[in-house]
Amino acid sequence: MMEGALVSASTGVMESVLCKLSFMLGNQYSRNKRVENDVLFLRNELSSMNAVMQKHAMSKERDLQVKAWMKEVRELAYDIEDAIDAFMAQVEEKLDQPTGIKGFVINSIRKLRELVSSSAIAEEIEELKNQVREISDRRKRYKLDESTSKDTKAEIDPRLPALYTDVSTLVGVDGPRNKIIKLLIEDDVDGRFGPPLTLVSIVGFGGLGKTTLANQVYQKIKGQFDCSCFVFVSQRPHIKKVLVDLLSGLGGAGNMWDNKKKLINQIREFLHDKRYLIVIDDIWSISEWEILKCILPENSIGSRIITTTRILDIAKSCCSSFNGHIYPIEPLSDDNSRMLFFRRIFHTPDSCPSHLEELSVAILRKCGGLPLAILHIASLLATKSDTKDEWELVLNSIGSALENNHTLQGMKQILLLSFYDLPPHLKTCLLYLSIYPEDYKITPRSLIRRWIAEGFIAEERGKRLEQIAQSYINDLTNRSMITPMDIGYDGHVYQVHDMVLSIIKSLSAEENFVTIIDGQQSSPLPTKIRRLSLHFNDSQDEVMKTITTNQHCIRSVIVIGFTKQVPNFSNSRTLRLLDLGCCEWLQDHHIECIGSMLQLRYLVLHSNFITVLPDSIGNLKHLQMLNVKFCSIEILPETVIQLRKLICLYVSSVKLPDRIGNMQLLEELSHILLSSSSIRLAEELGSLRNLRHLTITVEDPSEMEDRGTRYKEVLLSSIYQLGRDNLESLSFDYRGQEDFILDSSMGLALQRLRNSKWMSTTVNLTRLELDISRMEEGDIEILKCISNLLFLRLVFTGHAPSGRIVIDDQGFQCLNEFYLICFIPGMWLVFAPGAMPKLQRYHLTFKPQSNSDDFRFGLEHLASLQNVTVVIVPICARNVDISVAETTIRNATNIHPNQPIVEIHTWQ
């Protein structure tokens, strides 16, 4: 019912509130007649308000009265949801009360208290109803429904200056320009523009200089064509005007009275026998491209097309229409950034005063290679004196300067174009990224869980919420709003450009969506804080006071940056998300109140001083994610099995209650300790049919004789069952004194995977980690059967085959990342030609065998290799052995056509 309710930055929790009000009317929650009438009024009135808010949320510029009214409604919606949740929690508590004699006694004791509490909630809903009536009357009084979005100034195309930039002032253009020209003529033999119609689509973030680069290519080559034209499309184009401009630019004649079909036919007729060059700049939608491509006849006489866009999918669509190439424009290098920056301020590229060098580095880091940002901020600094204080002031106030400084308004306008083009759900998810400080590495898995807990992800039939959230990340990347950084086998780590971060922080504060406390507050904090991101620093006393005074309305708290102070959350009844991953001084008494946070969906606690979770953790009926993996907890309380909505559970070698099978929604279960004495736990593990990621440490059952044998059989049977369901990632740590994981019994079971009946059991498994004491040479053959494996980590600490194992071209066809950690002297893998064809990252830790002169690894045979990390363990090895091993590895990678990045370390 409510799980897919959408929370929006512009409309707040209005959709969620309406959904809950409808649910209350149709269920036992509204048996109180007074409450029922109030709920009906609230639903009807808020539905009308929501329609108005949705209309205004889509506009770029809102009337000041509209902004104020929407803020009131948003805040009220939050308060209403908090009241509803408190009321529903009380009703649900009554429904869960015991029956019989025990239930009679408990109900009698609580009867008076519940009556008073129910009355209080009814009065609170009555008060909220009065507030809704007042806001509704104000809306009618000021005729806000008639307000429309109006631009207060004539719109000036921010791209025009790019067409008239003096070539002598440009930096870093020559290389990209020549690469694009090469792409346009790469099919030609004599360096001229040959017959096939060819297209290059320049794609990248706003402000990177796409228009400037396209114009430089255009000016360089347009003389080689019969006709040429450079035309703007823009975010909200008048397509007929674009067509008229294009026709007149080419030298034809058209007018605004012609319809689009006639104009398209005129342009096609004009171009059909001409060798043309056309630049179509700033395309924002595929539907617009579908119209514009109709004007471009494939006349096979060497015509060329250049398009620019901020959106990767549009670039792909342009290229699919013709013989196309995508050119992703890159930020300026550090050297080119400095040259552009100093040339604008000091008129020469190398004349920065020494006392400003360090500040210039910091300012340029904020600009992140964005030419537009560099030029605008340099223009601002050019009006200042060259004192350290002036430059420090600009550095520390770049975010606010975007709001208030006329020089930077053009840059803000260009960056905001991308934001306003986002659909509402992506605007919400992007604004939420304001919780992170500059240069923060954002991991998709934690971000997705936060989005879900906050209610930002709407359900779609046939898809899991995680899949939908990942598509949101993909969309933001596709639109160049976030930047993919490091990549692993399972995806990227992301960053937000500093300039984008400054803007979304400003917008987020304006909507009271997220409040950031980082010691740089220049304006008062909002009266009611809904989401709080704490970047701890010298203002910690103010932080603690803020949390205390906002406990009645705060919905999420995220702490980024280590602190010794511990916030007090004793009265935080409205919290949905609590991330104290950086509060390393948390102790057991600090979390005694956790069980009272009945709305909590997401909980992270990381502290060595936490040794036990309170039994009241079982009260958190809505909890979806529990992460205590860096705590000193050895066993979870029995009540944890009451967390029926829990999806992710991260612990660290912790024993679980036996009845874990009750937690049927679990998808991720990390670093649990499977006691060899608990056969029931091993058995119930196999009933978690939705489990996708499992990390387990297994105790040695070898001394238990018959019971140990039974334990092994049950555990292995559970793992096979999980593999037949949804298991994608398995990490298995076993350090016993005998074979267990890849011993004869499991080997026999894995061998059965080769039969079609069993092959399906590992169809979803993409990640496997084995930390074991024994392995035989034939076990590698068994692992080859896991056909979809993307990540493999093998750790050997005891017995392994002597000498080297050859990996041939059979098996491991999808493997992307491989860790081999072995402390047995002289044991490693040799790759034959065709082995692991998609392997990009190889991590090897090994002990060279003394007096060995054969350190062949076959790295040159790994066709897709990009990164190699080697750790040499020097114990019992001669210096010459270590030197020869390192030389062999470097020689192999030097001759590799990919020239992979190599890091070699010696174990200290």
Image (cartoon, grey):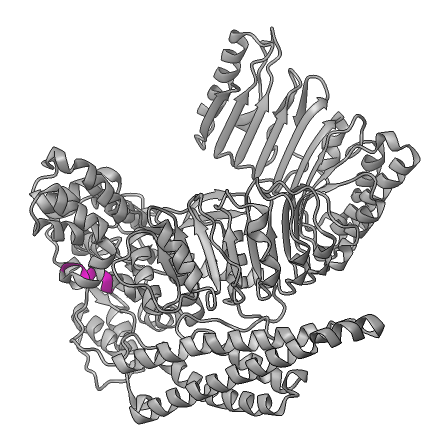
> Is 280 contained in the magenta span?
no
Q: Quadrant of residue 1?
A: bottom right
Magenta region: which residues?
A: 407-413
Who is closer to the viewer here, 449 or 41? 41
- Identify the residue at horizontal 55%, vertical 51% (top origin): 590
Taking the image as shown, residue 452 lies to the left or right of residue 370, namely right
- Identify the residue at horizontal 37%, vertical 68% (top origin): 512
Taking the image as shown, residue 75 lies to the left or right of residue 59, namely right
User: Principal SS element in the magenta part?
Assistant: helix
Determine whether 33 is above or below 396 in the image. Answer: below
Who is closer to the viewer here, 403 or 36? 36
Q: Quadrant of residue 705?
A: top right
Determine whether 879 is above or below 145 in the image. Answer: above
Residue 808 makes an appearance in the image: no
- Identify the residue at horizontal 58%, vertical 24% (top origin): 845
How many numbered discs, if any?
Answer: 0
- Identify the residue at horizontal 61%, vertical 83% (top origin): 24
Where is residue 756 drawn, in percent x and y? 80, 49
Taking the image as shown, residue 830 lies to the left or right of residue 175, namely right
Residue 378 makes an appearance in the image: yes
Where is residue 798 drawn, in percent x and y? 72, 22
Where is residue 709 drawn, in percent x and y? 89, 36
Determine whether 428 is above or below 567 in the image. Answer: below
Who is closer to the viewer here, 642 or 737? 642
Determine whether 623 is above or below 807 in the image. Answer: below
Where is residue 336 drawn, in percent x and y? 21, 41
> Is 408 contained in the magenta span?
yes
Q: Residue furthest right?
A: 706
